[in-house]
Amino acid sequence: MNESCLIKPLLNGRYPSVEYGQGIYLYDSDGKKYIDGSSGAVTAGIGHGVKEIAAVMKEQAEKVSFVYRSQFTNKPAEQLALKLKQWAPGNVNWSFFVNSGSEATETAMKVAIQYWQEKKRPGKTKILSRWMSYHGITIGALSMSGHVERRARFVPLLEDFPTVEPPYCYRCSFNNNFPECHLLCADQLDRAIRRIGSDHIAAFIAEPIIGASGAALVPPPGYYEQIKEICLSHDILFIADEVMTGIGRCGKKFAIDHWQAVPDIIAAGKGMSAGYAPIAATIISDEVMEPIQNGSKLIMSGHTYSANPQSAAIALAVLKYIENHGLISNAAEKGNELLQKLNQLKQNYPLIGDVRGMGMLTGVEFVANRGTKQPFSRVINVTKLIIDKSMEKGLLVYPASSGIEGTAGDAVIIAPPLTVRSEEIAELVTVFEEAVKEVQAELLLRGHL
Ligand code: PMP
């Protein structure tokens, strides 16, 4: 098969063709084996080739695969919504199903705006967010995203939503240290709201642990408690974008459960169906639903495939699989092992500037000088060197970048499926070490270290 008209991420890039997957491993058409060290894009939470899920797929497809949401409800979608109600914190009880993380965050944005309209405060339309964030690729979701590189081409079409510095202790925007900083990064939200005026702001959106643009940035203790308090005091909704961090990934059902800061709206995706079907959810609190239920009586959004029974049945089966196999506690436990092993690597390879993460979501940031934290020039593209070398050796890791020269330019996420075993973590880290060692030697040779 030499001819191809499939548009790939890099048009002239060479990509192996996957043949099948089993557990944390993927196999290409040449028979080469890869450790799925990032669950794809932090998605394949229960691993590949799970027979129980395949059986549910077949069973549901034979019953009914698609109905249109304004003509029928369906059992799988109803049951999935109930399951998410059990999983989500506080009164975050109502699910609106969509097909991707971008749609989930964009729906969250619209629901927040609609909520204030129903409350007769239609001026509250802005969504505040942070630099170094990623909430999705559609224009609304991208407007909320503080990922400079991904915004760049579309800036004239985007709202100027990102306003607040990220909680990024390794490179604090205020050149400060925790706890002496008194959480200046959280305080920034308060200042931004006062400057803009809360009458114009509907919500603040944040990834509880920053993923694609920061490589598993865990905020300092007390950060989200303060954020929640600021939102409450200014009448602003708090949206947790759990598309990457949710569904057990960070060692709790949702990552925000690590803190006392129940959101008003949660966006979930990726691990919700673990890659077995495209489905995502905007999960909304009773308090936010109430004025909508008493007002317009419908959410002003929706897609053809929203809440289709096929995807819903698969996501429901995935959530049950996670529960039945104790995968959330496994993520917490094995995540600690992974973090420990990566920290050991850091001792031996000056190329590694920082190791961080929570549960089965870890990040490794690379620096030219560990003492000064000097990043590499973007031209060298150390992230790509690491990713290519890892892949050559049969390990998949996921690129993360702030998109801004001089900050977290080079980092990768390591986030294998939540099913991962200790031996598999040891194997993953061994291969990663070989890749880091070779890239470090090459950079030394080229005079970049
Ligand atoms: N939010 C977060 C936190 C994400 O990590 C992503 C995907 N990387 C999205 C939203 C967008 O999800 P999708 O690619 O499914 O549209």
Image (tube, rainbow, N blue to C red):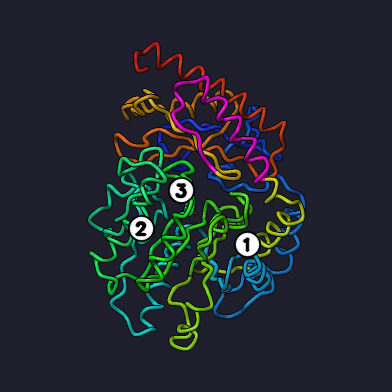
Q: Position of residue 360 (x, y in %)?
A: 60, 43
**Tag in front: 3 or 1:** 3
User: In which quadrant is the C terminus drawn?
Assistant: top left
Q: Assess disc 3: are there few (<14), some (14-19) or many (≥20) residues with their C-alpha within 10 Å of its C-alpha.
A: some
- Residue that mark 2 sits on: 129
Q: Is residue 347 magenta?
A: yes
- Residue in view at x 44 percent, y 67 percent: 108
Closer-to-camera residue (181/140): 181
Amino acid type at mark 2: Ser
Q: Assess disc 1: are there few (<14), some (14-19) or many (≥20) residues with their C-alpha within 10 Å of its C-alpha.
A: many
| Up/down of 368 relative to 120, above or below | above
Amino acid type at mark 3: Pro
- Give the overall secondary structure of the magenta segment: helix
Which label was assigned to residue 311? 1
Tell me the CA gap for discs 2 and 3.
18 Å
**Outermost residue toward the front in this view:** 180
- Residue in view at x 34 percent, y 57 percent: 187
Q: Quadrant of residue 403?
A: top left
Closer-to-camera residue (184/390): 184
- Residue that mark 3 sits on: 220
